[in-house]
Amino acid sequence: MKINKAKAFWQGNLKDGNGRMQFVNSDTEFPFSFKSRFEDGVGANPEMLIGSAHAGCFSMAFSNILDGEGYAPKEVNTIAHIKLDQVDGGFKIVESHLEVEAVVSGIDDDLFQKLAVKAKEGCPVSQALGAIKITLDAKLKK
């Protein structure tokens, strides 16, 4: 299987330093700092990248499951809310809440909800995040 790589560079101390994260084989860099991670500063942070990975993985898994059940998803839009909390004097990611809206014709809401839960549990990123609480709010749009 493919091995994906990402890299990060940090310069300076925690509060005043800054860095950048980048996916290998990509020209896109994500600048990050203490302010972008713990306050309201501009830039990215590791939790945002985890969130985008979780949202992307779930969207792909859900689309695949819907297709496998005979439903053609027109779109699956997912936002992952990653919660970082102070725990025992340190910081810990404690939750990922997936908020999804999908346009799928011909499916009833009960089956839609069941398949959304299946995607949440089966997505490889959800499985990697097994140490945290993962919740889901799925809305069917027709």
Image (tube, rainbow, N blue to C red):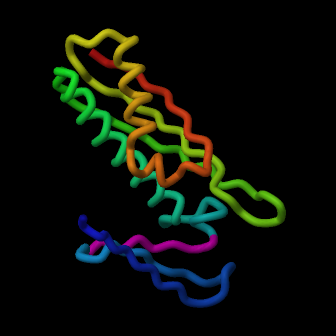
Task: Please tell me which residue is depicted at 46% across the width and 46% down the height of the picture.
Answer: 126
Q: Is residue 119 magenta?
A: no
Q: Nearer the viewer, residue 117 or 80?
A: 117
Quadrant in the rendering for residue 60: top left
Left or right, 128 with reference to 94: left
By secondary structure, the bulk of the magenta-drawn segment is best described as strand
Q: Quadrant of residue 5?
A: bottom left
At 68% across and 79% down in the image, what residue appears? 15
Which range of residues does the magenta coloring cover? 27-34
The image shows residue 13, relative to residue 107, as above or below, that is below
Q: Position of residue 142 (x, y in %)?
A: 26, 15
Up/down of 20 relative to 4, above or below: below
Task: Judge left or right: residue 71 versus residue 51.
Answer: left
128 or 33, which lies in front? 128
Q: Is residue 7 above or below residue 101?
A: below
Q: What is the count of numbered marks?
A: 0
Residue farthest toward the right in the current orientation of the protein: 88
The x, y position of residue 123, in whole percent, is 38, 44
Residue 72: x %, y % from top left: 16, 25
Q: Residue furthest front?
A: 1
- Which residue is found at the position 32% from the left and 9% from the top? 108
Instruction: Measuring from the top left, give residue 129's x and y in whole percent.
Output: 53, 52
Extreme-bottom residue of the structure: 12
Q: Residue at x 24, y 64 (%)?
A: 1
